[in-house]
């Protein structure tokens, strides 16, 4: 999904850019929001970039690696996300090896979904000026 297709993603990007230029580098834009970073493949730089951005926007963050979750025991992507939603999350940042995984998940859960990279699609650093 392009930033133009989802204005919330564009606002998120502009807010992160503003916070990085701010003297205190922390703004309350996402205060009270809970964001889950759901990574199904290793990507230290991408995960840390999102985590820093979320913290600078004052969000509460939770990191979930597929290797240590119920996914490794056979739970589906959608079931995992729905279980997380039951804990009243607001957003999922997902990194997945399958192309279209973020869009697939976004069509099936109520929380906002941000694509941190999926399969053969462009890496978020190449598309997103906030990373």
Image (cartoon, rainbow, N blue to C red):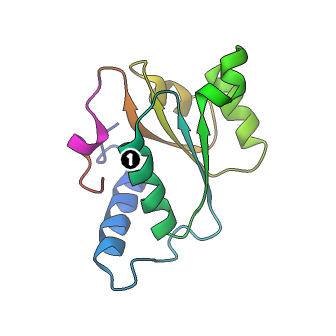
- What is the quadrant of residue 47 in the picture? top left
Residue at 52 percent of width and 27 percent of height:
40
Q: Nearer the viewer, residue 97 or 28?
A: 97
119 w.r.t. 103: above or below: above
> The N terminus appears in which quarter of the rendering?
top left
- Could you tell me residue 35's position as x and y percent? 59, 52
Residue projecting furthest to the bottom:
23
- Whether residue 17 is visible, yes or no, is yes
Residue at 21 percent of width and 41 percent of height:
126
Q: Residues within 10 Å of mark 1 (few under 14, many from 20)?
A: few
* Tag count: 1
Residue projecting furthest to the left:
126
Residue 38 shown left or right of residue 24 in the figure: right
Residue where numbered disc 1 is placed: 6
Residue 76 shown left or right of residue 104 in the figure: right
Residue 73 shown left or right of residue 122 in the figure: right
Residues drawn in magenta: 121-127
Residue at 54 percent of width and 67 percent of height:
30
- Could you tell me residue 119's position as x and y percent? 36, 21
Residue projecting furthest to the right:
86
- Could you tell me residue 4's position as x and y percent? 28, 47
Magenta residue check for 67? no
């Amino acid at each position: 999904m392009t930033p133009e297709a989802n204005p919330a993603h564009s606002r998120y990007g502009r807010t992160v850019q503003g916070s990085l230029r701010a003297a205190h580098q922390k703004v309350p834009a996402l205060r009270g929001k809970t964001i889950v970073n759901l990574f199904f493949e290793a990507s230290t730089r991408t995960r840390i970039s999102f985590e820093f951005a979320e913290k600078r926007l004052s969000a509460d963050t939770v990191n979930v690696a597929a290797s240590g979750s119920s996914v490794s025991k056979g739970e589906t992507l959608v079931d995992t996300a729905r279980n997380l939603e039951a804990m009243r999350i607001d957003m999922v940042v997902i990194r997945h090896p399958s192309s279209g995984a973020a869009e697939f998940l976004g069509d099936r859960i109520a929380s906002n979904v941000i694509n941190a990279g999926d399969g053969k699609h462009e890496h978020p650093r190449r598309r997103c000026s906030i990373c």
